[in-house]
Image (cartoon, coloured by chain):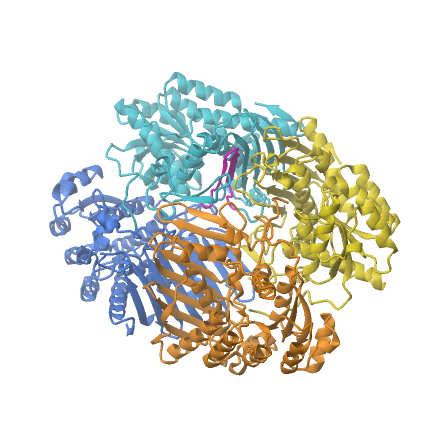
Chain colours: A cyan, B yellow, C blue, D orange
Amino acid sequence: MAIESSSNPDHSGRRLRLGMVGGGQGAFIGAVHRIAARLDDRYQLVAGALSSQAARAHASAEELGIAPERSYDDFATMASAESERADGIDVVAIVTPNHLHYAAARAFLEAGIHVICDKPLTTNLAQARELAQLAGDNKLLFAVTYNYSGYPMIRQARELASGGALGSLRVVQVEYPQDWLTTAAENTGLKQAEWRTDPERAGSGGCIGDIGTHAYHLACYVSGLQLESLCAELSTFVDGRQLDDNAQIMLRFAGGARGMLWASQVAPGNENGLRLRVYGSEGGIEWKQENPNQLWHTSFAQPTRLITRSGSGASDGANRLSRIPPGHPEGYLEGFANIYSEVADALQSIIRGTALDAAVDFPTVEDGVRGVEFIEAAVESSTAGAKWVSL
Amino acid sequence: MAIESSSNPDHSGRRLRLGMVGGGQGAFIGAVHRIAARLDDRYQLVAGALSSQAARAHASAEELGIAPERSYDDFATMASAESERADGIDVVAIVTPNHLHYAAARAFLEAGIHVICDKPLTTNLAQARELAQLAGDNKLLFAVTYNYSGYPMIRQARELASGGALGSLRVVQVEYPQDWLTTAAENTGLKQAEWRTDPERAGSGGCIGDIGTHAYHLACYVSGLQLESLCAELSTFVDGRQLDDNAQIMLRFAGGARGMLWASQVAPGNENGLRLRVYGSEGGIEWKQENPNQLWHTSFAQPTRLITRSGSGASDGANRLSRIPPGHPEGYLEGFANIYSEVADALQSIIRGTALDAAVDFPTVEDGVRGVEFIEAAVESSTAGAKWVSL
Amino acid sequence: MAIESSSNPDHSGRRLRLGMVGGGQGAFIGAVHRIAARLDDRYQLVAGALSSQAARAHASAEELGIAPERSYDDFATMASAESERADGIDVVAIVTPNHLHYAAARAFLEAGIHVICDKPLTTNLAQARELAQLAGDNKLLFAVTYNYSGYPMIRQARELASGGALGSLRVVQVEYPQDWLTTAAENTGLKQAEWRTDPERAGSGGCIGDIGTHAYHLACYVSGLQLESLCAELSTFVDGRQLDDNAQIMLRFAGGARGMLWASQVAPGNENGLRLRVYGSEGGIEWKQENPNQLWHTSFAQPTRLITRSGSGASDGANRLSRIPPGHPEGYLEGFANIYSEVADALQSIIRGTALDAAVDFPTVEDGVRGVEFIEAAVESSTAGAKWVSL
Amino acid sequence: MAIESSSNPDHSGRRLRLGMVGGGQGAFIGAVHRIAARLDDRYQLVAGALSSQAARAHASAEELGIAPERSYDDFATMASAESERADGIDVVAIVTPNHLHYAAARAFLEAGIHVICDKPLTTNLAQARELAQLAGDNKLLFAVTYNYSGYPMIRQARELASGGALGSLRVVQVEYPQDWLTTAAENTGLKQAEWRTDPERAGSGGCIGDIGTHAYHLACYVSGLQLESLCAELSTFVDGRQLDDNAQIMLRFAGGARGMLWASQVAPGNENGLRLRVYGSEGGIEWKQENPNQLWHTSFAQPTRLITRSGSGASDGANRLSRIPPGHPEGYLEGFANIYSEVADALQSIIRGTALDAAVDFPTVEDGVRGVEFIEAAVESSTAGAKWVSL
């Protein structure tokens, strides 16, 4: 083992009480949220409406050590009951399929409970805006788990790109290829494939909603640019599939930068190939999710530098989210946990009435709204034959 | 040293007599053509009109060992004189800036001399088609140095992608970023930058003509697909520059495959980052020019395989163009030389009246025509605000 | 997000009660053990003797939510008190500097408490053997955190190398370069550097004990080979340093395989570069800790295959230790957590009196003994001028 | 295409007259030497004793365009005849199996003809020293083709490592794994395997002589260090093989640096994996032959920098040996050609009586002597059971 531990100490504040909607047995992303919440020991999972099937909900709750009386049959009951308990949950994590986000989030916001919600925020823009309005009106925290923004090297990329080190930004290239839907996996009983390719549950976007929205968020988060218009070609290559499985989009950003976004779930050989490149008048950066501890930075006419998590060139903003020394890889779960830990920082500020560390920078309901806006614009553009659409 | 030498033996046929137009002192690509011609010892450079400035032309010729009487002041004189010599050149290499290709190529074709011409073929489509017609009418060989098609692993990629191993093709992603025009290098006396950014000499395409056309050719060469329409956003990021320095294009191929092409000369940290990925219903491939001896191949639901030049998984078609054992890298000059050597094969077939090896597969004037068509369509699309244009 | 979650479900068994010796404020590896214990929610930290300084011990305990009456001033008191509680700890994690491992481990073993101990096990071989004897006599579980064996791809490497897929093993190359001791960091107040370079606390090995022993364990774990003899050159390059900071060792394994081991803490540009290669008569494998989700496997005369965690070529034995889909990197903490979770499996088998899953395969006190034996042999060899020493 | 051509212009001096001994049909390295000589157009191949079998010699000569009267039956006749011609060869390239180097080189040196000889120089040290003496006495140039020293990035590595930028050197790790002799290829009719595993023709070293000597030369060339002693374990893993196929060696350099060298021809998955790392008190470098255009350089406590051939951080000394812009890979043949071109520089200096450019830095007969000394010491050490042997 190598160097002195510095960042992410164990925290002495009380553990936050966390509830969960969705994420019962057989789900995937719920388990990720739970690990993320647990990693830095800032949360206790104490309540849940873990499944729309009561038996599964309660069995899941028991497995997770949730007291029977706090395992609810539905989120409405849960929101109401928890809001009345003295030891009610501080925050709820909503990890259902997309179409259920809206009603669940609304129920908790109306009950005065902070929300962490998976992406995309909702299946239409009106609902997304309503949630944003409601959170604002009720002065509640609302985080959306665009988890890739939690990687330390993404924080440093954001500092470089949006902070001026690359000069005036010109080109943003972002891509997110996967291959797991190359064949009709939704017909083989794979639950993750079923709902993601079903417009009833996923919304109007398939690949664009599942991963394209991650790529879009990351590009904007790092560059600090605002999208003005897009031209999207959404394709469905697998016979019988109802939603897009490949998305190719041209991007025009305010200020003149130009970009391309490619997301695919039918690109054999790609597992989770999210990759971002940003170029400006004075430099460029490149980052790949599959090796997230590295960030490549070039100042024009200088050799490219390899900046590593916790390494010699890492910034304070990146180090703040690192747990272990350089060369000891942190991965997806740690990045996801960083979002949870920043939400914990924010919640504890609220609870204590103290000022929030300015460095805390997790994605919020506003990012969620923009993500849904992006999906709708892409679908509109593509449906019109890949015409330019303004946002 | 490792294994038995097999391919690319020294050839016993007489060396072909090569002439050159352009490529005098201070030029770049001319020297590359000369090395490519020399590498496999199939050519002798015996005549030239190496510069439009007579003094430079003759000094260059002397340096290269060309006899004074075969150093010409202009290509027209050269074409005429060489066509009358018993030992006249077999073939001419045209390596001038783009705007001179047409007239020079025409002169030699009319003189009955075979042509090797740099890309893009001409600065407008009408001229390109005229050259194709003329070559056809006169039954003359006309190669265009889309040199990246000469890499052995590209030959294997072509076998896999166009040969069915990837299944039905769906997605083609090609990119070609560079960074050498990030600043206004054309104002600093850099000749290579000057003419490439000057519409008088480069034609209507800047980056799209200089390198976008390479990317386009490679995508088509490997996939075997035909482009049906495109939607192009050409940008000029450097103040005062007259031509595009960044090109982002969406591609629709016959048969339903979809693609994206990105070419840039303002992407700091990229030297010569040509990279191609092709995905089909049964597999995918990836290749990067900067490490050209490697080809990644994935059969869907199998681990990705690393195929290396001359290595265990290399095909006969790839090995045919290899000189040395695996792990001993061959590079850009060797790939370029492969085009010259295949042209030599073809010329010797013509000279001897023998059948040409079916494996010979260099780019021809037809590829050149398609390249100019692509540039024109991209410029048209972009000028119209990035609208779809059919080819 | 991609595929169905499968492995590493949340577990329904009660959380195991964990105690910790060492690991108070300012320590490094203690925090890693705690995260590892927490990640899969199999443990609760309920007791500790977290520092030899009482004030620091108790402050640390409070921070970690340990009840004041279970924060002990010393490990002896803790062992005794916990062994008498009905809800006493199931297992203790010993994460002190090396010289304290022996006495602490002995105290808990004598109190009938299972032990997880950091490496190297002790500072001399006699003590190591004594602990092994004691654990055996008392039928107690004793794990040693050679944590790199917890990576899923290392499990697959072990299957391939020790399972015959590589044929008869011939060559084992293992290396572990770091750079954090390139200068005299121990003189700058860096605690991690201080004790690791102090023979009183680290034992007779510096670099060889800190990381060389990891490399040695990994080589044996994966290959299944037993070391017969070694020839070691231990060097101290930094002026005034008391222990070795660079170790170069030749290895002779039973059965005829030959190996080399290099460990260094003075190799600028290396963060935590543990890398293992094993070659046999029929194939080879390569793995690098800094990108632990990848394993390269070559069957002789076939293209090299890239096997990824949870990916197409991953084995059941590897998948058992994976939490999330391929392409979502798991890292150092997850690998470490796998050791803790396997220990939890074993402890729950003991508690329940059920048979242990045969796949559970964490390093034990026997590995710890061999590690100390290795360090002593290396020091002996080097002291004698790099002579061969039998084990 | 990218930037202005600068280095390696076509040269105006007359082409040097080259003879060759060995390298007839079926040979491998002879063809490499010929391409290397041809690449920069500095040589003409005009004479040869290309095979010990006369028919093959003359057929080979005809193929290569050598006049019949200058195709000789044996090297002795050739040396004598060429030394008497007014247009006799300037230099001879000796590319036979190892055991013939000595007699051939001696014949040409005695005839007053400069020599380029493949490595290892001879099959015993006495002969090597005799050649060095003879070359010195006769004031003849004698190059030995340790070709890897011809890579531009190796020149920059040498500047950095031996020039002080890395501080005081501490550790040198060099390795050269291949896999082509994993099975008994010498029994399958593969000529390259036959003579390299035959002590009569290869000398006392197998793998150590074929590739270990390359690794040794490169380590010394780059570091500027002198080897003081070594401890070698040479193994023969393939049944019936007469020479070593795997070599593991510990190195002690003058001044206190320590190193390891591993060479193997039985490591499946390795093609030509020569790799060098050098570490000092202030920095480190890493270079891999299979991607020779990249050099990694770390100044301690700074991010690692990627220096590329002809790129932003490339030195004048590296650029001197580059032909084409960055990102256009140059490979093995270009590196080999650099040795030939530097020899041409030296020969033309001699012919013209001008001073030689101080940057010219090809390996000479002295390097050849040291290489043979290294092989002999390694064999001696290994035979004694891997004992330390001084050089």
Out of A45 and C382, give the one closest to the viewer. C382
Q: Residue B233: x and y, percent?
A: 64, 31
Q: Is residue A237 visible?
A: no
Q: Residue at coordinates 79% horizontally, 42% vertically from top-left? A: B102
Relative height, residue A84 to residue C55 (above, below): above
In this view, the residue in front, D315 or C120, is D315
- The stretch of residues the image draws in magenta is A271-291
Q: Residue D283, image x and y in percent?
A: 37, 52
| Relative horizontal placement of residue A206, taking residue B229 as reference (left or right) | left
Q: Quadrant of the N terminus of chain B?
A: bottom right
Q: Residue furthest front?
A: D353
- x then y, percent, for residue C329: 43, 46
Q: Is residue D200 left or right of residue C151?
A: right
Image quadrant holding the C terminus of chain B, namely: top right
At x 53%, y 80%, the residue is D198
| Residue C240 lies in the magenta stretch | no
Q: Name the residue at the top extreme.
A: A137
Inspect this view and state whether residue D172 appears.
Answer: yes
From the viewer's side, name the closer residue of D345 and C9.
D345
Which residue sits at x=49%, y=24%? A369
Number of numbered labels in the structure image: 0
